[in-house]
Amino acid sequence: MRKLYGIIGDPVGHSMSPLIHNYFFQKYEINAEYRPFHVRKEDLQRKINELKEMNIAGFNVTIPHKEAIIPYLDDVDEQAKRIGAVNTVVQQNGKWIGYNTDGIGFLESLKKSVPNFQDKKIVIIGAGGAARAIYFTLAQEKVSRIDLCNRTRENAEKIIADCRMGNVESEIYHLQQCEEHLDQYDLIIQTTPVGMKPNVDQLPISLKNLSQHAFVYDIIYNPLETKFLQMAKLKGAGTENGLLMLLYQAAFAFQHWTTIFPDFKSLKPIIEKKIIGG
Ligand code: ATR
């Protein structure tokens, strides 16, 4: 019987996940399909029941349900519990188990572009769900210092207070303070939605004090090169966009569902083309 997978979110129409997972199902000749499900906050409970009735085999969870989904699950993996957010649900013997593949997806992509990231002085811009998953994952990787730079100080304070892993030291800076001292960082991780399509002219902070030896990672993948990354390149810094993180988090989700860790080499240019084409 054809298995059903999908993604719940609001908005969900722009999601690349249906393209990615249907590509994987085809590639590995698995009789399954992956569909987007537009689920508003207020409809979550009702839609969850509908998904159960449809006997969905697994699904991804995106904004704004990554935290709200947790009470509906039968079990949550340790790392997802720590992060406090679930982006992948697997049905096992009628039970729903939640995982988080955002942090590990980021980590695997970072290892490719900055293999010696543990030695770097790191700052994360933003303190939302993505920043939280990245901070917790890096803290577990024995990174000694990760500063946070955010518009709202309390949101950054909460991430640091909730993180019980590693011995990471952190300072919190306001956006303007971070701009002024940017030259002290080797690795800048941009996690806010600032610069995302259609607001492609926006910058979360100025890069005027960026060191040319720094590496700038922007988790946005649409556009493929944000203004932030363009500016970083002009300064001579290394850059990476969020596409590899997207692919790795999807690959880990697919592995939870099928046990196969999919090869996405040939998929990357297809997604790039789709993003450029709008
Ligand atoms: P997610 O949870 O998916 O990571 P988000 O909740 O939309 O994304 O936002 C992530 C971060 O981007 C938040 O920390 C937010 O700052 P606040 O904590 O002050 O709300 C930050 N952010 C969003 N829009 C911003 C903007 N225009 N300028 C600066 N920071 C912004």
Image (spheres, grey):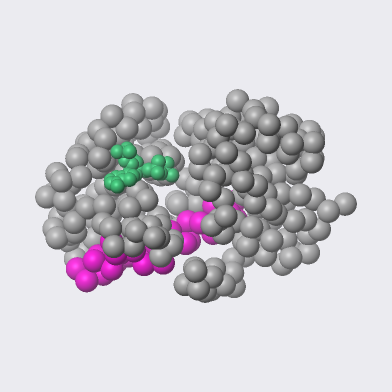
Q: Would you say 89 lies left or right of 151 here?
A: right
Give the x, y percent position of residue 13.
57, 55
Main structural element of the magenta stretch: helix, strand or loop? Answer: helix
Examine the rendering and report whether any part of residue 65 can be seen.
Answer: yes
Judge from the rendering whether residue 187 lies leftward or rightward of residue 46; answer left or right.
left
Q: Nearer the viewer, residue 24 or 163?
A: 24
Residue at the spot 48% in from the left edge and 61% down from the top edge:
244
Quadrant containing ligand 1 reads top left
Q: Position of residue 126 (x, y in %)?
A: 32, 44
Q: Which residues are magenta?
A: 224-252
Q: Is residue 125 magenta?
A: no
For image coordinates 26% across by 57% down, the residue present is 203
Q: Is residue 175 above or below residue 270?
A: above
- Nearest the viewer among 222 and 169 is 222
Camera-side residue of 176 and 106: 176
Residue 97 falls in which quadrant of the image?
top right
Q: Look at the image and tell me whether residue 272 can be seen.
A: no
Q: Quadrant of residue 234?
A: bottom left
- Position of 53 with respect to 6 (left or right) is right
Q: Position of residue 276 (x, y in %)?
A: 47, 72
Q: Please give the name of the residue rendered at 52% of the width and 33% of the height, measured from the top-left corner.
A: 67
Q: Is residue 171 left or right of residue 13?
A: left
Residue shown at the point (62%, 61%) measured from the top left: 20
Q: Position of residue 172 (x, y in %)?
A: 22, 36
Figure disc tally: 0
